[in-house]
Amino acid sequence: MSQSNTTFASVKLPAALVAQAREAAQPMRRSVAGQVEYWATLGRIVEHSGLTAQEAQTAIANYEAAARRIHPASTEAPSQANALLAQFMTTEADGSLAQRVREVIATNRSKATSAAA
């Protein structure tokens, strides 16, 4: 995306969200604004693909369980936002997110076709 053609607007965000974005942005070499934009993009993908809040919560729970198995000595659970981001990054990298989105879209199209008939 070319920044020269991008219009920006200011918004107020909770300080805790900005702090989480700052923490998540650092290893990814993103700005805080870039991290918030990335999360918003993921949110739009989830929303438009038909994934439910329950499916997103399940992804978080699965990530946290996997993190506990990998790092059992760690008593700190990752924040939900970081957990969700990590889950999406993992599923994005291995192709399972794209596959799940395709499955949900196919199911939704099938339901829409059945309802229209």
Image (cartoon, helix red, strand yellow):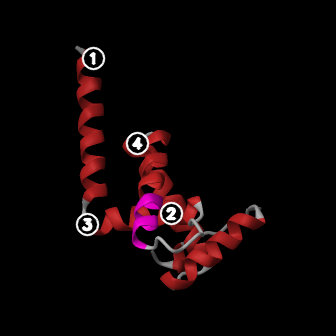
Front disc: 2 or 3: 2
| Quadrant where the image shows the C terminus | top left
Of labels 2 and 3, earlier in sequence is: 2
Of labels 2 and 4, earlier in sequence is: 4
Image quadrant assignment for residue 36: bottom right
* Residue drawn at point x = 49 percent, y = 59 percent: 84
Of labels 1 and 4, earlier in sequence is: 4
Tell me if residue 105 comes above or below residue 46 in the rendering.
Answer: above
Measure how far apart labels 1 and 4 are at the Cα level.
22 Å
What segment carries the magenta color? 63-70
Badge 2 density bin: few <14, some 14–19, many ≥20, Cα 10 Å: some
Question: Label 3, on which residue?
Answer: 94
* Residue drawn at point x = 54 percent, y = 73 percent: 74
Question: Label 1, on which residue?
Answer: 116
Image quadrant assignment for residue 103: top left
Q: Amino acid at mark 1?
A: Ala
Describe the element under mark 1 as helix, strand or loop.
Answer: helix
Residue in the foreground of this view, choosing between 43 and 78: 78
Is residue 92 visible in the rendered structure shown here?
yes
Badge 4 density bin: few <14, some 14–19, many ≥20, Cα 10 Å: some
Badge 3 density bin: few <14, some 14–19, many ≥20, Cα 10 Å: few
Residue 108 in magenta stretch: no
Describe the element under mark 2 as helix, strand or loop.
Answer: helix
Instruction: Specify the label residue 83 is tagged with.
Output: 2
Residues at discs 2 and 1 in contact (Cβ within 8 Å): no
